[in-house]
Amino acid sequence: SVLSDGDGQSLLVSFSGLHDTFAATLVDDRSVLLLYNMLYINHRFLNYLLAKSEPEALLVPVLKLMYDAGTRASSENYMLLILLLILTHDAIYSSNIHSPDSTLASVPWFKERMLTSITLGSLAVVLLVRTFQTNLKKQDAFLSSNCLAVLANMAPHFNQLHPYAAQKLIFLFEVLSKRHETLSREVAGGSPAAALAAHTIHSPRDDG
């Protein structure tokens, strides 16, 4: 396979070997940045990843990094979300990760509850809403909007969602509905309290 460095120089590399290396070493922000750069400058490699019949090899490490970064700085999630945006922009990829063929038997690193028989797509939904939820107090508009953008990419391909993923989506709907309601009151000239509330997303009770 041909890999370009972006300056017109090319060399022959094994996309299979490159994929396997990323899958084994995607453990920090430096490796994530390197993967992003590879996808950005080389569409052949991106197309190779999108066509892989086993997307979990690379997607699970990305989602685990998002899980681990959930309680730390928002900046650690930025590049992960951009990677997910690039991957889920492809309709076939989004459909594949929601297919029963992409079902994981378990997710041992997810500690909030035991997740079994969950598709890659459902796991992505859980992690995206979790990241959005963690960001409620931080009010990072870039992070929140990109979480929603990835969900929007995948939404047409939702299939046999895991019950926990469906629960998380209901939580998200409640949050956004409340936000819309308070903004509507502000626009309509509501009370000062409503206007103040419009600038903060309040989290309804979430039992999981």
Image (cartoon, grey):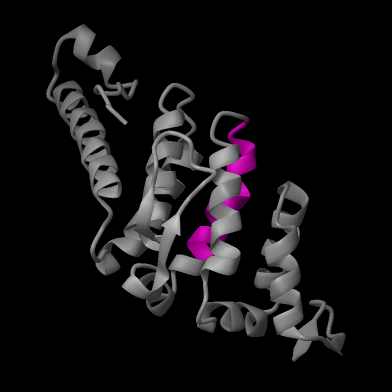
Q: Is residue 205 left or right of residue 16?
A: left
The stretch in magenta equals 73-86
Q: Is residue 174 magenta?
A: no
Q: Is residue 38 above or below residue 136?
A: below
Q: Is residue 27 above or below residue 67?
A: below
Q: Residue at x 72, y 83 (%)?
A: 15
On-image quarter of the C terminus:
top left
- Residue 193 percent location from the top left of the image: 22, 8
- Residue 143 percent location from the top left of the image: 49, 41
Q: Is residue 28 above or below residue 153?
A: above
Q: Is residue 174 above or below residue 91?
A: above
Q: Residue at x 41, y 53 (%)?
A: 123
On-image quarter of the N terminus:
bottom right
Q: Is residue 79 magenta?
A: yes
Q: Nearer the viewer, residue 191 or 21?
A: 21
Q: Nearer the viewer, residue 171 or 24?
A: 24
Q: Residue at x 21, y 8 (%)?
A: 192
- Residue 52 percent location from the top left of the image: 54, 81
